[in-house]
Amino acid sequence: MSDLPLAKPDAIGIDPIRLQRAYDLLKDWTDHDKIPAAALCVGRKGRIVEPQFFGRHRLESPAASLKPDALFLVASITKPVTVAAAMLLVERGEMALDDKVTRYVPRFAQNGTQDVCIRHLMTHTSGLPDQLAINNKLRAAHQPLSAFIDATCQEPLLFPPGTKVSYQSMGLAMLSEIVHQVTGKLLPEFLRKEVFDPLGMKDTSLGWQPEKKVRITEVRLEREMQGTDWHWNTPYWLGFGAPWGGLITSPADFACFCQMMLNGGELGGVRVLSRATVRAMTGNQLAAMAQIPEEERRCRPWGLGWRLNWPGHSASFGDLLGPRTFGHWGATGTVCWIDPEAEAFCILFTTQPQEPEGRYLARICNIVAASLL
């Protein structure tokens, strides 16, 4: 499998005039340094409009314009990819969603964690924190992922599992350790063999491919990262391969993953996930959790790894998408969404952190959604 075939917008039911508005806006934002760099890839019905690139490759070098082979650190868009790896083990019968985490990682059995199930890790209902209290300390010491997992095993829960929703990157750290314990392979290797290689995603890896370092676009740093040697653009973090945020990819490569999800787990004759797995990952998993507050279950639903559409919320995918839409954001300034009803997806990678309101991302999402005929 290789890149998806290219198409003119009107050949796949996309209004070229409306779509051009998105390109014009991204060019204006990058020209005026509101966003250092951006890339937009829109796909529909198995084909993509040629990805467009804007801005500069290096933060301090205005002359270094972004090239079509640019790679991006996509942050939390990593999460549904990590969950996809674990779901392969579920569909193969090697584990089940309601298995206790301690069954696979016995040292996790501390501080009331014995009731945390794999399902909780995938739906942000485990009670684990988003980041460890010693996150910066570990990063400053250039500690490996194993140190983060060890620390997570000693972390007290914020609440009993299955009773609340609280976004938690450390749940994905534990999920990666479960994949490791079940398969004997570290998550980057497992993903390469089971997902990226079958889909022809040659430019995608969890953690960098060092020989492609020069193609990775620099992210504008948040204040607390400035002056450190462990921030997003450093060799340490690019090579770390965080299961919650270390994916490095290109728009065209990630389009293959999105199209695979749209196709029910298959692309180009290669089946990566079963249809049943895709249904589970993209359905509201909170609906069956009786102790989750009703407002969360109804208004802010989660699938497995994927976040479902949250209209009327600041962290939405814009204002115009339907209830079956699923996707994810990334703290480095990235978003992707997939709309099964329109058979379409949108991939927007920028290098401008968007928290908390994502004003740039949401506006482009609105334009793209409005361009679907």
Image (tube, grey):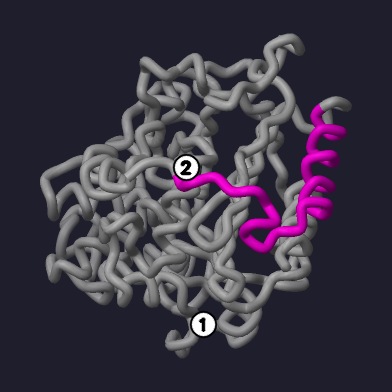
Examine the structure image and report whether residue 9 is included in the region drawn in magenta.
Answer: yes
Residue holding disc 2: 245
Magenta span main SS = helix
Residue in the picture at 13% in, 51% down: 183
How many other residues sit within 10 Å of disc 2, few (<14), some (14-19) or many (≥20)?
many
Inter-mark Cα distance, 2 to 1: 26 Å
Q: What range is drawn magenta here? A: 4-30
Query: Which numbered mark, 2 or 1, is in the foreground of this view?
Result: 2
Q: Is residue 27 left or right of residue 75?
A: right
Q: Amino acid at mark 1?
A: Ile
Q: Is residue 280 above or below residue 305?
A: below
Q: Position of residue 134 (x, y in %)?
A: 46, 37
Q: Position of residue 274 (x, y in %)?
A: 27, 69
Q: Is residue 213 left or right of residue 358?
A: left
In the rendered image, is residue 150 in sight? no
Q: The N terminus is located in which quarter?
A: top left
Determine contact: label 2, label 1, CB under 8 Å. no
x, y percentage for residue 58?
65, 16
Q: Could you tell me which residue is drawn at 39 percent across and 56 percent down?
A: 171
* Image vertical order of residue 292 relative to residue 178, above or below: below
- Asked if residue 227 is positioned above or below residue 261 in the image, the reply reads above
Residue 20 is left or right of residue 112, and the answer is right
Q: Which residue bears the numbered disc 1?
A: 292
* Among the 4 quarters of the image, the one containing residue 323: bottom right
The amino acid at mark 2 is Gly
Q: Quadrant of the C terminus?
A: bottom right
Image spot of residue 237 (x, y percent): 45, 26
At mark 2, the secondary structure is: loop
